[in-house]
Amino acid sequence: MEAGGLANAFGNGVAYPFTVIYLHNVRGFSLGIAGLVLATNAMVGLGAGPLAGIVVDRVGGRATLATSLVLMAVGFGAFPWVTEPWHAFVASAVAGVGNGGFWPSQSTLLAGLTPSARRHAAYALQRVSRNLGIGLGGIAGGLIATTSDASSFTVLYMIDAVTFIAFAVVLSFVPGPELPPVADGARRGRYLDVLRHRVFLGFVGLNVLFVAAGYAQLELLPVFAKNEAGVTEKAIGLIFFANTLVVVLAQLPVSKLLEGRRRMRSLAAMTVLWAAAWIAVLASGALLETAAAATAFALAVMVFALGECFQGPTQGALVADLAAPHLRGRYMALSTLSWELGFVIGPAAGGFILAAEPLALWPLAAIVCVAAGAGALALERGLPRELRLTPA
């Protein structure tokens, strides 16, 4: 499963960091429209995710994941033929349907294959393989992409589509955990049961802020770096590789370090690191250009990556621990919904802020990060005592 995820992440790294550049600099779409195209993927996922949660609980994570991968291959594979904004919105919507099912099914499958006491390590390992693939893909994409040749972006999206199919093929070698049994006469459960879980809802609500002010703004960094500081596509690929390198090297040691420690404090530490990274991006974009700016941006995303390492062993494992086994697909779907909502709000708002005043985006994102960290500390008292610490 991790090998398939690694190949898939490589394809995402090849294409996704350059999507705004492709839409804006190659196809001539405005930054606002480009941001909305990215947001469409997440917005469609908002609708598809809850339905995917029901499917996962009924047929299992493996079959749902394979279907999602095929849909994303079709959606992202259509991007080379985009010439009008509506083409991009349709392709992004198809990929969004697959994206809505991808994370609930993959997270449920991973939780089913892993004992509870080791889930934090399993999710940390997933973060390592995903970031390694994205980082290597980012380097490859930076070497391939050039705005002077539109066909170079065709190569990017074809590679991405092939890796989705490769992951679907690899899944045939992964065992599918048995669905949790339901007693005779008992109902399997409904979303209403999940929505009554207030602590869980608070937790995923905070994740919306984490994603909107964190990961979603990382997607806008390439176009900011290119247009405001003159950073080349090759350097952008290396910047994302620097982010990946930190995650790959630090994730498992940080996961081990967090064992026996408070989960919510880990998330608060993450937001402080992210805020520091965005302030560094602000200073770099305002004061530096070309190679110097690229070096400073690389250092900033390395700080951001260290923050990611605090979330890796915390977010998915805590959701799995909070979930009733027969409702795990639905819990994972709502958790995924928080990511999708963050990726709707983040690129849409960030794209328009970036177009109006590029330097205003980064301090605003830093403020939201710090506020979300404070919310995580406040939520801790609502967690069951046995779930407040990362298992040791």
Image (spheres, grey):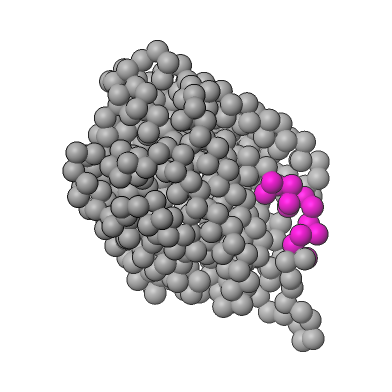
Viewer-proximal residue, 367 or 390?
A: 367
Magenta highlight: main SS: helix
The residue lying at 65 percent from left, 65 percent from top is 330
369 sits to left or right of 281? right
Above or below for 57 versus 376:
below
The quarter of the picture where residue 74 lies is: bottom left
The quarter of the picture where residue 131 lies is: top left
Residue 22, image x, y percentages = 31, 43
Residue 290, image x, y percentages = 29, 20
The residue lying at 42 percent from left, 32 percent from top is 221
Residue 174, image x, y percentages = 43, 71
Queried whether the magenta region covers residue 25, the answer comes back as no
210 sits to left or right of 106? right
The residue lying at 76 percent from left, 59 percent from top is 195
Residue 167 visible from this viewpoint: no
Above or below for 98 versus 25:
below
Queried whether the magenta region covers residue 199, the answer comes back as yes
99 sits to left or right of 203? left
Question: In the current view of this chain or complex, which residue is farthest to the top?
Answer: 287
The magenta segment is 193-205
- The quadrant of the image that shows the N terminus is bottom left
Residue 40 visible from this viewpoint: yes
Q: Give the tally of numbered discs.
A: 0
The residue lying at 37 percent from left, 23 percent from top is 228
Question: In the current view of this chain or complex, which residue is farthest to the bottom?
Answer: 184
The quarter of the picture where residue 30 lies is: top left
